[in-house]
Amino acid sequence: MYRQYRYRLGAVLAAALLVLAVAACAGQQTTTPPAQAPAGATAASAPAAQPTTAPAAGAAAATAAPAAKTQATTAPSGAAPTTAAPSGQTAATGATAGQGRGKGGELKLLFWQAPTILNTYLAQGTKDEYAASIVTEPLAWFGPDGNPVPVLAAEIPGVQNGGISSDGKTVTWKLKPNIKWSDGTDFTADDVVFTWQYNADPATAATQTAQTQGIDKVEAVDKTTVKITFKDATATPFQIFVGNLAPIIQKKQFQDYMGAKAKDAPGNLKPIGTGPYKVDDFKPGDVVTYSINDNYREADKPFFKTVTLKGGGDATSAARAVFQTGETDYAWNLQVPWAAFNPMISSPSAKGDLITATSSSVERILINRADPNKDVNGARSEPSAPHLILSDLKVRQALKLAINNKQIADQLYGKGGGTGTCNLVVGVPALESKNTKCDQDIDQANKLLDDAGWKMGANGIREKDGQKLHLIYQTTVNPSRQATQDLVKAWWAKIGVDTELKAVNSGVFFSTDVANPDTAAHFYTDVEMFTNNSQSPDFIQYLQGWTTKEIAQKSNEWRGSNYERWSNPDYDKLMGQIRGEMDPAKRASLIIQANDMLVNDVVDIPLVARTMPESGKSKDLKGPIANSWDTELWNIADWYK
């Protein structure tokens, strides 16, 4: 599961939220709808924020707006990133015009993590969500600047256009008329309402239930109007139906597969959608083939007749397929060790361009609070069975202190690939905590283990009450991750930890297979590692992933986002405060508080704040615009050669 969530609030957006809070919107001119973001949030490693005073009566404090980052970048081989497309293009996706429907041949996509399901609401990996986004769409994408852009919606709701109520409790969406599903039936507000019902049903065990938190009801006012009513005033009006984690699914296709039947729906493998392409064939763990959706709403798009998304292999071979052999048009998530990657992209003979953008991605080590060795009603790592070693804060602190984040970033990610971080919420100075520390200190780590009663044995491995300090550390098969494992194992050896390394094929690790013990969600090891970040511009959904309700376990088919099985009532309460806090400065403070709770209790060990996973495109492929806020395939309808 390579999860993500990110949020941004510029001066206009901050003003809009403050206007809501003080009910002073009369006469306010707003050209950009208010986004649901905390003050100043943007993607990881963004430029320093520029202070901006919100022009709203009674504003409690100025909010920090990030430096303009509305332009995604494409870096040609051997050159610094250059602007790929100006901001403010026409159409929802940013393209200036279509290139002619079906005038191109096959578009080849290469994902070394192969998709296993095409229903986003049951997916547990970014590769699944991206593969589905070619077919199923939300009401709006999050654009490269973090603001929503219409897709199925006619416009973005705002205070000025009446889409967001002055009390912050309702959001009304106007849908584009005459949109058809790929099977030729009408797309209506009933499909939107059904999607909410499907996602909110506990028996569905959906992976995106955080979107439904705080919502009282979703109603179809008429065929093309949807009204969302929140239980309380909300600072996150776009938490649902926006972004690739929130697509609209067809009521007709899924209405007989609600709740416990959800996993059996044929549409999980062949969804009917409104997007530019439809699924022709899907072999889970291998390949998806798509063809043009003849009912797509834009008559001159898409350009390519077919799309083939090939899965499997590894990141290094995927990079070679773009930059050296030219065998593919687009390769995703090229997490390749810098020593091997740099020669590929900088070679004068390189056949591709590197696409990257700043993001909120953090490579981290997850700490299992449940016992992976104890069977509880036919399952392991169940929250009712505390971990015999890692339940001790001193042990977790020692593991963290032994690690050198900066060395991992510098040695394995290279220039521009990422920086060592102490935080799980990253991306903008206004939201990044200054309270956390992560300097390596082997001596202090050893002292903590001494104090915890773990005595160093003659063989260099600590023991306590006859138990060795032995940990199994798993991640995906990936050269950068295996190199990280090697470094961490060596550091942990210095403090008496016997570390057993495990590498799992990514197609298995990020799959939804409830019978496979090697998935990240099962977490049947002591620690595991992958990247996670905010995939909709609202940190509340990202942070919601660590609440008690989100604990992954047998009862919810391991679909919860809380793989760590961490439970803290104070943290759960804090999430409610963040959701309802309308003041941007106070909201930012609460987000920092949440980050600090996670970091200081060593729920995860943050390692590297990454750029958006570098992807590569062939030099003759036009149209891809890097977007760290949403699916990389968000504007695939505009791609051409």
Image: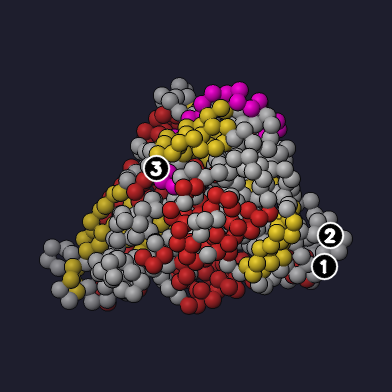
**Horizontal and vertical percent position of residue 372:** 28, 65
Q: Nearest the camera: 54 or 310?
A: 310
Q: Secondary structure at mark 1?
A: loop
**Horizontal and vertical percent position of residue 473:** 29, 57
Query: Which quadrant, please, contains the C terminus?
Result: top right
Report the residue at 30% width, 61% height from top.
524
**Horizontal and vertical percent position of residue 278:** 55, 37
Report the residue at 27% width, 77% height from top.
451
The image quarter containing residue 226 is: bottom right
> As drawn, is 10 to the left or to the right of 519?
right
Q: Is residue 253 above or below residue 197?
A: above
Magenta highlight on residue 452 = no
Label 1 crowd bin: few (<14), some (14–19), many (20+), radius 10 Å: some
Q: Nearest the camera: 395 or 214?
A: 214
Report the residue at 67% width, 72% height from top.
232
Q: Which residue is mark 1?
A: 24
- The magenta-colored residue range is 95-117
Q: Are marks 1 and 3 in contact (CB under 8 Å)?
A: no
Residue 555 visible to an observer of this rendering: yes
Q: Are marks 2 and 1 in contact (CB under 8 Å)?
A: yes
> As drawn, is 443 to the left or to the right of 355?
left
Residue 449 visible to an observer of this rendering: no
Q: Which residue is mark 3?
A: 284
